[in-house]
Image (cartoon, helix red, strand yellow):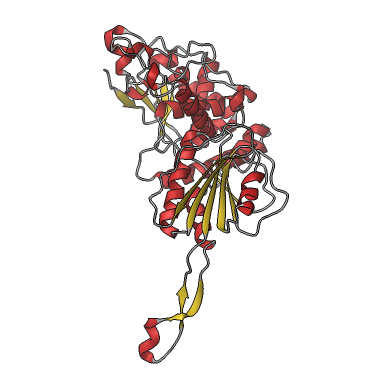
């Protein structure tokens, strides 16, 4: 495979890209000023284009096959993927699906701003206004649901490559043509199954017409991320002064620079602070006994019950549930509460698991699937005589809350961004980004 990559330095840029970038500066200054921050890289190993927070790589043949308006739209898309932080937030997610999620999140903004995108660009009304993380979770869930059950797996090795879905969960574009008629070498990584025997992929690659977003791999990631946040704010202010900043972009700019809090750190801090700690003379501080001082020592009595509730309505995806379960176990092993109580609830409590101190808990998969209401777990705690040190509720916040606050601390772990989540009438809320 040709892996030729050429960095166009000293101001040399593909003439069509240079022209459309200039058009962005003049007509859409928010996008234009940010586009100037990206280094243009000719990359014939990629089928279309990519962006990684520092460079915009492109195949010149792909550029030449786009109309002027489509090329301008693709440039705006790549800029927005960086401006929204998608190059920094991928983590361990699969690149192809993350690129699709990023495109789903951004295309509504570009469409409302008057941009034209190539045919096959990913659009779905379900994902309007949602973050890339939310969309990625939905796409992952859909891919799992499409996988055949063990008893439905093909018995013939010859049939297996044709019937088994793509492991990366890619799907076709809205027009059903999503670029699957070519080998999928996005980012230079071709699918071996698609090339074996000259067969094409069983499912077309999604988002092929607009390239991919890659995770920034440089050593100065925090610095680059901070620089882009500052650049986004400055570009938004400059465009607003010229009267060329649509409302959708203004909201996006504010969201892009909003600080992201690690929900795991908040969860552990909440659990620690909810654990009783005080000074006591029952165990004097040995550090000062040799001096004749009888001083109290910091005493941490046994932590009561730690209660975790998982929203089982189906609105919280499996990947998030799995990561939440891992943090439940981490809190259990760190704090060593009297009991670990894990409840599942949709409109009613569907499963209760209780583990004693010293156990090696294996949390069972979430059980449920109905609507959403938050009252029953609190009623169950009172009815069963449970005295929680704290209660943590993982949910999308879309349900009926209890009328009264309990006497114990409550942390709402919201899978919906706090800017769109319903406000809980009591307790603390943290945004869960998985």
Quadrant of the rendered image containing residue 15: top left
In this view of the protein, which residue sits in the foreground, 304 or 83? 304
Q: Is residue 244 visible?
A: no
| Residue positioned 44% across, 88% down in the render | 294
Residue in the foreground of this view, choosing between 355 and 242:
355
Residue at the bottom extreme of this rendering: 292
Nearest the eye: 20 or 118: 118
Horizontally, residue 234 falls left or right of residue 191, namely: right
**Of 150 and 87, which appears nearest the observer?**
150
* Quarter occupied by the N terminus: top left
Instruction: From the top left corner, tell me how far across and down residue 313 is, in percent.
Output: 59, 34
Does 217 sit above or below residue 191? below
Say above or below: 224 vs 283: above
In the figure, 331 relative to 130: above or below?
below
**Does residue 9 appear anywhere in the picture?**
yes
Q: How many marks?
A: 0
Residue found 27% across the figure and 18% down from its top: 2
The spot of residue 146 in percent (x, y) is 46, 20
Residue at far top of view: 198
Apparent side of residue 203 relative to residue 315 in the rendered image (left or right): left
Q: Name which residue lies at 32% across and 19% down.
A: 190
Q: How far across and down, in percent of the image, does residue 19 sit? A: 50, 21
Picture coordinates of residue 331 (x, y %)? 45, 54
Q: Residue reaching furthest right?
A: 403
């Amino acid at each position: 495979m040709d892996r030729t990559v050429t960095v166009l330095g000293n101001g040399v840029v593909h003439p069509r890209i240079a022209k459309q970038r200039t058009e962005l500066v003049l007509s859409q200054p928010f996008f234009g000023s940010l586009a100037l921050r990206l280094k243009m890289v000719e990359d014939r190993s990629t089928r279309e284009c990519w962006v990684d927070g520092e460079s915009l790589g492109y195949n010149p043949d792909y550029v030449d096959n786009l109309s002027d308006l489509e090329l301008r739209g693709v440039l705006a898309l790549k800029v927005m993927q960086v401006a929204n932080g998608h190059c920094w937030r991928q983590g361990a997610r699969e690149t192809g699906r993350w690129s699709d999620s990023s495109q789903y999140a951004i295309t509504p903004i570009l469409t409302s701003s008057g941009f034209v995108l190539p045919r096959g660009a990913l659009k779905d009304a379900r994902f309007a206004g949602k973050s890339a993380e939310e969309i990625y979770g939905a796409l992952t869930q859909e891919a799992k649901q499409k996988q055949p059950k063990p008893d439905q797996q093909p018995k013939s090795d010859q049939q297996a490559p044709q019937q088994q879905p793509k492991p990366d969960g890619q799907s076709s574009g809205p027009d059903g043509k999503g670029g699957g008629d070519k080998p999928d070498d996005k980012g230079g990584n071709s699918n071996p199954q698609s090339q074996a025997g000259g067969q094409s992929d069983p499912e077309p690659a999604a988002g092929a017409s607009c390239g991919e977003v890659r995770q920034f791999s440089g050593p100065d990631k925090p610095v680059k991320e901070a620089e882009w946040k500052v650049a986004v704010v400055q570009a938004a202010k400059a465009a607003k002064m010229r009267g060329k900043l649509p409302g959708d972009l203004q909201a996006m700019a504010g969201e892009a620079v909003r600080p992201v809090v690690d929900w795991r750190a908040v969860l552990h801090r909440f659990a620690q602070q909810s654990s009783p700690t005080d000074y006591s003379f029952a165990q004097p501080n040995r550090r000062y006994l040799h001096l004749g001082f009888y001083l109290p020592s910091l005493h941490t009595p046994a932590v009561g019950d730690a209660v975790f509730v998982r929203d089982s309505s189906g609105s919280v995806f499996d990947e998030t549930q799995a990561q939440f379960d891992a943090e439940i176990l981490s809190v259990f092993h760190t704090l060593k509460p009297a009991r670990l109580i894990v409840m599942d609830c949709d409109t009613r409590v569907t499963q209760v698991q209780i583990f004693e101190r010293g156990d090696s808990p294996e949390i069972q998969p979430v059980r449920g699937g109905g609507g959403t209401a938050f009252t029953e777990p609190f009623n169950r705690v009172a009815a069963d005589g449970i005295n929680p040190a704290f209660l943590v509720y993982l949910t999308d916040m879309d349900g009926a809350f209890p009328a009264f606050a309990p006497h114990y601390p409550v942390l709402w772990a919201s899978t919906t961004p706090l800017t769109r989540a319903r406000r809980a009438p009591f307790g603390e809320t943290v945004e869960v980004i998985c």
